[in-house]
Image: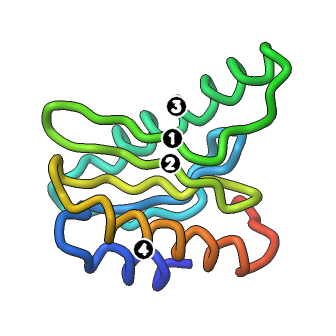
C-alpha cells in the first residue's frame, strides 16, 4: 500500500496521502515532511468518523467522496471499499487530472484485498 500512496504523491501539487478506516484508524500514511503527520491523521480520522456518524444518524450509508477546501489547501476523501483514501493537496491544482489519479488510486487500494489495522 505504501508504494501505491508514493505513486500518487508524485503528482505535482499533492502533499501527501493516507488511508483511514471507516472507524477512523490510520492504516497507512505517506505525508511530506512539511505536514505534521499526527495532526493530518487526527483531522482525517475525525472527518471520517463524524461524517459517517452524521450520515448514519440520518439513515444514509457511508459517503463515497468528500472534498474539503481551505485557504491553504484541499483534502479529498475517496472511498476504497473498507476504508478511505485521503489526499492532501495544494490549493488550486488541476483537479481534473488529480481526480482521475485519486479515483484510480482508490480502486488500486480497494483491489489490494481486505484491509487490516496493525
Tell me whether circle 1 and circle 2 mark residues in contact (CB < 8 Å). yes
Are dots 2 and 3 in contact, CB under 8 Å? yes
Which numbered disc, 4 or 3, marks the residue that appears first in the sequence?
3
First reached walking from the N terminus: tag 4 or tag 1: 1
* 3D distance between C-alphas at marks 4 and 3: 22 Å
**Earlier along the polypeptide chain: callout 3 or callout 1?**
3
Determine the CA span between mark 2 and mark 4. Answer: 13 Å
Query: Can you identify the residue that label 4 sits on?
Result: 101
Image-based side of 91 in relation to 25, left or right: left
Crowding around mark 1 (Cα neighbors within 10 Å: few <14, some 14 to 19, many 20+) is some
The tag earlier along the polypeptide, 1 or 2, is: 1
Q: Secondary structure at mark 4?
A: helix
Depth-wise, is mark 2 or mark 4 nearer the camera? 4
Question: Mark 1 and mark 3 in contact (Cβ < 8 Å)?
Answer: yes
Q: Which residue is mark 1?
A: 66
Q: Earlier in the sequence, mark 2 or mark 4?
A: 2
**Badge 4: how crowded within 10 Å, few (<14), some, or many (20+)?**
some
Identity of the residue drawn at 31% across and 73% down: 9
**Residue 55 at what x, y percent from top left?**
72, 23
Left or right of residue 16: residue 73? left
Furthest-right residue in this view: 59
In this figure, which residue is indicated by the disc labeled 3?
A: 47
Amino acid at each position: 500500500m505504501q508504494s501505491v500512496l508514493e505513486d500518487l504523491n508524485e503528482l505535482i501539487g499533492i502533499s501527501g496521502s493516507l488511508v483511514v478506516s471507516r472507524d477512523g484508524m490510520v492504516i497507512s500514511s505517506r505525508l511530506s515532511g512539511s505536514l505534521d503527520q499526527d495532526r493530518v491523521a487526527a483531522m482525517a480520522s475525525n472527518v471520517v468518523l463524524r461524517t459517517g456518524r452524521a450520515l448514519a444518524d440520518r439513515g444514509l450509508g457511508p459517503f463515497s467522496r468528500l472534498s474539503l477546501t481551505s485557504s491553504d489547501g484541499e483534502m479529498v476523501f475517496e472511498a476504497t471499499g473498507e476504508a478511505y483514501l485521503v489526499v492532501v493537496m495544494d490549493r488550486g491544482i488541476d483537479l481534473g487530472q488529480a481526480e482521475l489519479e485519486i479515483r484510480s488510486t482508490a480502486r488500486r487500494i480497494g483491489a489490494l484485498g481486505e484491509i487490516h489495522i496493525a
